[in-house]
Amino acid sequence: MNHSSQPFGTLSAEQQAQLDAAGAIWTTDINAYRDLVVKTYSPLVLQADNGGIDRERDVHYGDAERQRLDVYSRAAWRNAAEQPRDVLMFFHGGAFIRGNKSANGAIYDNVTYWFAHQSCVAVNVEYRLAHDAPYPGGADDVIAAVRWVQQHIAAFGGNPSRIFLMGHSAGGSHVASALFDPTVNDRLTERDIAGAMLISARLTADVLPDNPNANGVRAYFGEDESLYAVRSPSSHVQSCNVPLLVAVAEHENTHLDRYGQEFFEAAKQPPRTALTRFVALPRHNHTSIVAHFNSGEDTLGPELIAFMRDAHKPTL
């Protein structure tokens, strides 16, 4: 597979033009354009060479049907003589009301395969949706999955002291709540997590008229809009000092790029001292920002690996 560091660099000229055109009008029909992105990247992802990477599928970290995860690792990493590997846990999106860890056998398996190729032990997590687990159920599932990983990941060659969380869209909201919302039981702290990467995440709850996923927000955060501010991760950004990376696409679902920028700006303020980075990915959209992983295009991934590498360094 040819590799490219340019956005859309492994797509044909026609495919690039299609995604550029979709990005320009992304918010007019996010479902249709999401499907276009998945259709475009899936063939590239499916032809990736994932030889040597083992995947243990559908391990339960809780009693509910959707409380399952997949672990991606190499057999050699399970040898006690091997250095324990950084652990990357990925939480998919889906507007709180849909989505799963493997939409079509390609997306979002591509994310965790890519990190396994970078010598991480990668964990792809599915969680309960809003109708079964409204706020703060998503955060509860993030925490439950992390507790399972802390107890079991060493058997896969992972380092339980170097767990990184990556959440996309609604998954990013759940990751952020698990870290920053002080009302969440057994909330994660910097003692549990080496770093967090919030990718196109919903960090502020709203049901504004131009929010295409307002129904999903209402289903998860509740009918009482007066509670949205206190239930939003953006209201509590100072409550955890975990190293943090926020990434947004050029073509985002309405308001998510602004919410990401605001979250990052708040996270830079004292008393937080942890590493804090912001990445804006040109040309990409809300879906392609994760769909391009393991397609031969390396744009966002190297930024995340650099963040993970630097997260243990003291902040000057």
Image (cartoon, rainbow, N blue to C red):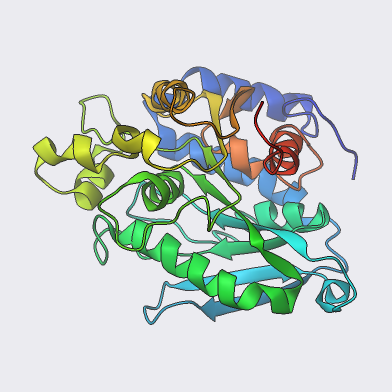
Where is residue 114? Give x, y as percent.
75, 52
Q: Is 284 rendered above or below residue 128? A: above
| Displayed quadrant of residue 149 | bottom right
Q: Residue at x 84, y 71 (%)?
A: 77
Q: Is 34 rendered above or below residue 53? A: above
Where is residue 152? Give x, y as percent.
62, 78
Image position of 151 (left or right of 292): left
Choose between 94 and 277: the one closer to the eye.
277
Choose between 262 and 210: the one closer to the eye.
262
Image position of 216 (left or right of 79): left
Q: Which residue is drawn at 68% across and 36% down?
A: 314
Image position of 315 (left or right of 63): right
| Displayed quadrant of residue 303 | top right
Where is residue 117? Give x, y as percent.
82, 55
Q: Which residue is drawn at 52% across and 74% down?
A: 148
Which image quarter holds the N terminus?
A: top right
Q: Is 114 rendered above or below residue 202? A: below
Residue sitting farthest toward the top: 24
- Residue 27 visible to an observer of this rendering: yes
Choose between 81 and 153: the one closer to the eye.
81
Q: Is 300 rendered above or below residue 166? A: above
| Displayed quadrant of residue 55 | bottom right
Where is residue 222? Give x, y as percent.
15, 49
- Residue 105 visible to an observer of this rendering: no
Which image quarter holds the C terminus?
A: top right
Give the number of marks. 0
